[in-house]
Amino acid sequence: MTKNYLLATALSCLLLSAKAQTGWKPVGGRIMTPWAEKINPASPLPEYPRPQLVRANNWKNLNGLWDYSITDKNAEAPKSYQGKILVPFAVESALSGVGKTLDKNNLLWHKTSFAIPSSMKNTILLHFGAVDWKTDIWLNGQKVGTHEGGFDPFSFDITAFVKKGGKQELVISVWDPTDEGPQPRGKQVKKPEGIWYTPVSGIWQTVWLESVPKSYIASTRQTPDIDTKTLAVSADVQSALAGDKLRVTAFDGKTKVAEQEVEASEEASLPIANPKLWTPNSPFLYDLKVAVLRNGKVIDEVSSYFAMRKSSMGPDKEGTQRMLLNNQFVFQYGPLDQGWWPDGLYTPPTYEAMAFDIIKTKEMGFNMIRKHIKVEPARWYYECDKLGILVWQDMPSGDLGNHWEPKLGQMGGTDKDRTPESEGYYRKEWEKIMKDLHNFPSIVVWTPFNEAWGQFKTKEIAEWTKKMDPSRLVNSASGGNHVITGDIVDLHHYPDPQMPRPDLFGPTHAVVLGEFGGLGLPIKEHTWLQDKNWGYGKLFENTEELFKRYSSFMDRMDFLITKGLSAAVYTQTTDVENETNGLMTYDRKVIKVPVEKLKAVTDKLYTHSSVMP
């Protein structure tokens, strides 16, 4: 026997033992990914969750089996709980071990207890990667706080609530009205069908503890400028004192390339000589250290990283605006990526599973991903940064209008349908999402609206988005009610590739094909449902037919690029529920067309640099 075989066998035995001891098992009756079997219920998703702000040795992962209960919306915390739930998997998912659906009249309760390691001193922070939707938190019977938002990370200082020694009891309640509330909720609906999917309620990203000094770095903001060869860095330093300094140091590997000290409240500007530019073909990442100094002594320090890259526009030889990367035209082509899993819904079963989708996307020949109506955990963007995948980030939809119904392809939502309450939730969460994701260099486009779903005040929102982050392009309404604002005009056209008219929009806006394709091929024993599977157009019967049509699309795309097309998005990465139009099955067990064949017909799309002056 090989050493690897013995290690794999030992690991498998340990996982089986852990599952037997806890009594946890996934809910049956659904297809599962290969990684579901690799989950250790004692330690699911154990990786450090925040790669852009790392303090490596003073954190504790709280994922695992918690108590859960579902009560009436107005109920107090339960005295006894109904069973166990595997955090961080949503209560509706198979991997939660529960598989129950909430409604707007329910509260979902989670409870766990934990000890704080003796090494974790000073200020104790409790972090949540994401909880959908309204979260109330108690520690040791005392109310810590409330958070509203289903896609953004949040934290609370729990130092004042911690008992000395012994176990700490954490209780949270979650209210999630899904599609019966005013909040952003993406593609979740109570009655899934067509392009609308199973609800996701409760904790769906990692929960963790961190100890920090009394004065500490809560966040950083890093913005590269390749034209001036500088990196702007600022930090939110909590409880800073007068005279505190911020020291920012950039590294190429182990070689220091720049360092600067400024006042803690000021922005540093690091000169990056001879910058190595980040591209899909060469995704170079610099390391970064940011420290708070008091009287010359380091009182807090975090590690991060950055890339030198630029997202902008410029005219080609015909005067049509083109999307540029590092001042060069690079055709951006990638799949619509919903980020759903048959076993974990919003949450990948393992980190390996999450990385698998991105790796396969790259192998298929794509250089971009449109992250569709969802925000991913921070480590997803980290993988894109490392692998060299451009990202278009959507804002999750919500409040689709008073007359909207979840039917296939139906659009809806106008200014008059937005309530002030829902507008407030939209603005608050979109601003937080942009701030939280700002430092990831892979993100090159922000998309506030999709297909008129809850679209409102388009010009105002697009301009506000651009003001929040001038370093990226704004796709104001992907396939929606087009208003000449932002940087991009975006057409959706199924199944074959088409484009907006460059003579109408090209002088001021880049023109892109934000969705096309959707070629459907159900694979027996790998579908979410036995029937009602669909794609955009007639379902194909075999891989050869599908690939022949896809290849013809690439020929058409090659022509459209010469006429002014800057980017395109193919629907989609994987099947999702009863959509069978993915390049992979929903369970990721079948890649419908070999990646080598896909890449061979895609590569020609990246050979059009000659269109520029």
Image (tube, rainbow, N blue to C red):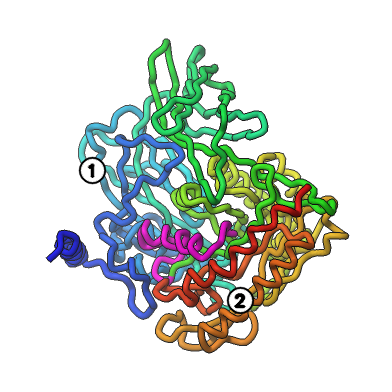
SS for dot 1? loop
Name the image quarter holding residue 292: top left
**Residue 254: horizontal and vertical position, in percent?**
39, 30
Position in image of residue 40 (x %, y %): 26, 60
Query: Does residue 392 lie above or below 469 as drawn?
Result: below
Residue drawn at 43 percent across, 39 percent down: 156
**Relative height, residue 532 to residue 105 (above, below):** below
Q: Is residue 22 visible?
A: no
Image-based side of 522 in relation to 508, left or right: left
Q: Amino acid at mark 2?
A: Tyr
Q: Nearer the viewer, residue 254 or 207?
A: 254
Residue holding disc 1: 167
Give the extent of the magenta segment.
Answer: 342-370
Q: CA distance from mark 2 to mark 1?
A: 58 Å
Indicate which disc, 2 or 1, sits on the residue closer to the N terminus: 1
Q: Residue furthest right?
A: 503
- Residue lying at 50% horizontally and 47% vertically, measured from the top left: 385
In the rendered structure, the answer to whether residue 13 lies left or right of residue 227 reads left
Provide the residue designation for mark 2: 550
- Which quadrant of the rendered structure holds the N terminus? bottom left
Residue 483 visible to an observer of this rendering: yes
What residue is shown at x 56% (from left), y 61% (from top)? 366
The amino acid at mark 1 is: Lys
252 above or below 23?
above
Q: Residues within 10 Å of mark 1 (few under 14, many from 20)?
A: some
- Residue drawn where x is 54% and y is 66% of the image: 599
